[in-house]
Amino acid sequence: MTEDRPEQQLDPELEAELEDGLAGLEGEELEELAALAEAEATAADAEQAAQAEELASARQQIDAERTQTRAAVARYREAVLAAEPDLPPELVAGETLDEVDGSLEAARRAVAQIRERISVEDEASSGFPAGAPARSGATTAGMTTAEKIATGLEQRAHMV
């Protein structure tokens, strides 16, 4: 699991000094340095593998928490809709609590505006009663018997 790294250009003087130093080393020392470099590379690879495993574990944990959060937001939405059945479910949406709260406020405003329009229309149309008006005849309350007979004869004369 080694990565290809672009070779870096060394300072010519430093490179010459390194070559002189390597030339001065004996075979056994060179083998020790090579083994040490290989051990460091193996340790770096092991560390990188451990970090990759840790990253994969963290990603799994994040995915699990996202799933739990989505479920909690869905339960919250359902609870709000159950508490306020007048709100249309189509207007309350979101993947986070803030999004659900925002759409909830918008839905409440929409319902309030619709109710206001309906009440204004009801008030405007209540200027006259629906249907035929009640019949109102001459009231005989407070009339004497002679006045009642005269009114009855008048009404009969108009009918004929």
Image: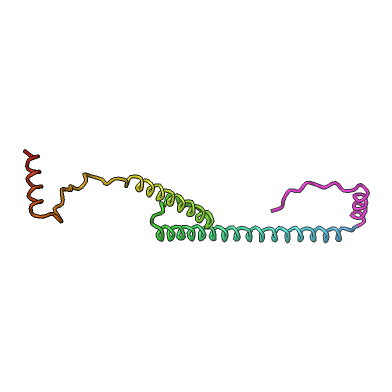
The residue sitting at 73% across, 61% down in the picture is 43
The residue sitting at 7% across, 43% down in the picture is 156
Nearer to me, 10 or 122: 122
Left or right of 66 on screen, residue 37: right
The image shows a total of numbered marks equal to: 0
Whole-percent x, y for residue 121 in the image: 36, 45
Whole-percent x, y for residue 60 in the image: 56, 59
The residue sitting at 63% across, 60% down in the picture is 53
Q: Is residue 135 magenta?
A: no
Left or right of 130 on screen, residue 71: right
The residue sitting at 48% across, 59% down in the picture is 71
Query: What colour scheme was applied to this rendering of the protein?
Result: rainbow
Q: Which residues are magenta?
A: 1-24
Nearer to me, 71 or 47: 71
Q: Residue furthest top?
A: 160
Nearer to me, 53 or 134: 134
Q: Is residue 11 magenta?
A: yes
Nearer to me, 32 or 97: 97
Left or right of 141 on screen, residue 40: right
Left or right of 64 on screen, residue 91: left
Whole-percent x, y for residue 8 in the image: 82, 47
Quadrant of the drawing holding the C terminus: top left
Whole-percent x, y for residue 77 in the image: 45, 57
When the figure is inspected, residue 79 is found, relative to residue 152, above or below; the finding is below
